[in-house]
Image (cartoon, rainbow, N blue to C red):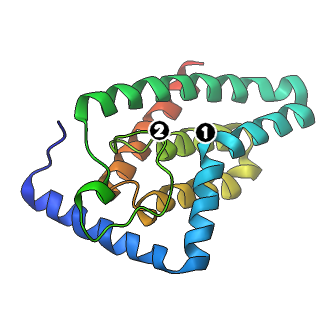
Amino acid sequence: MFVLPARLQLLDDRLAVRSNRLSRHRGLRDLMRAVSRLGDGVAWYTLAACLFALFGAEALPALRQMLVAGVLGVIIYKILKIRTLRPRPFEVVSDVVCAGSPLDKFSFPSGHTLHAVSFSLVLAQHFPPLAPAVFGFAALVAVSRPVLGLHYPSDVLAGGAIGATLAYGVITLL
């Protein structure tokens, strides 16, 4: 089971509450829900298909790296979720309200953030002009998770670190 030292857990709880308060604003909540839904994979699959349609075989190295990072990312985050069993903040912090739809039961790490970071780093490596758009979208995905009450900020930080490590690995090795 996931256990942070008490002081860090208190800080994580407080940041989760502060982030989640933003979901009280309807327009922001709706934006975060849309971003989160696109971060489920829709945006990345669509972008991959567009890159293949536009660049053909030239896009294949990036798409291969995204595929490997994506598969490894799913394996890693599923193992971590099963081993840590960290409940989602809306389940244990009374001031956090669930404003989105969780894809699974546990919180640590944020799979959305993991994939957003790894895919954006791979895409920026191969298609530098896309960097501002994919990094901006990845940042929105990461922010959406605690705003919607689905993750603690530490889940998002861990997901980002794992995603960056995966991206570095696939870019280096493939």
For badge 1, the amino acid type reads: Phe
Instruction: Please say if 149 is above or below 79.
Output: below
Judging by the rendered image, the residue that carries numbered circle 2 is 163
Q: Residue at the location (48% across, 62% down)?
A: 143
**Label 1 to label 2: alpha-carbon separation:** 8 Å
The tag on residue 104 is: none
Outermost residue toward the left in this view: 6
For badge 2, the amino acid type reads: Gly
Q: Residues within 10 Å of mark 2 (few under 14, many from 20)?
A: many
Going from the N terminus, do you reach mark 1 or mark 2 first? 1
Judging by the rendered image, the residue that carries numbered circle 1 is 119
155 left or right, relative to 122: left
Q: Residue at the location (46% across, 57% down)?
A: 145
135 left or right, relative to 59: left
Q: Describe the element under mark 1 as helix, strand or loop.
A: helix
Q: Position of residue 22 (x, y in %)?
A: 45, 76
Outermost residue toward the bottom in this view: 25
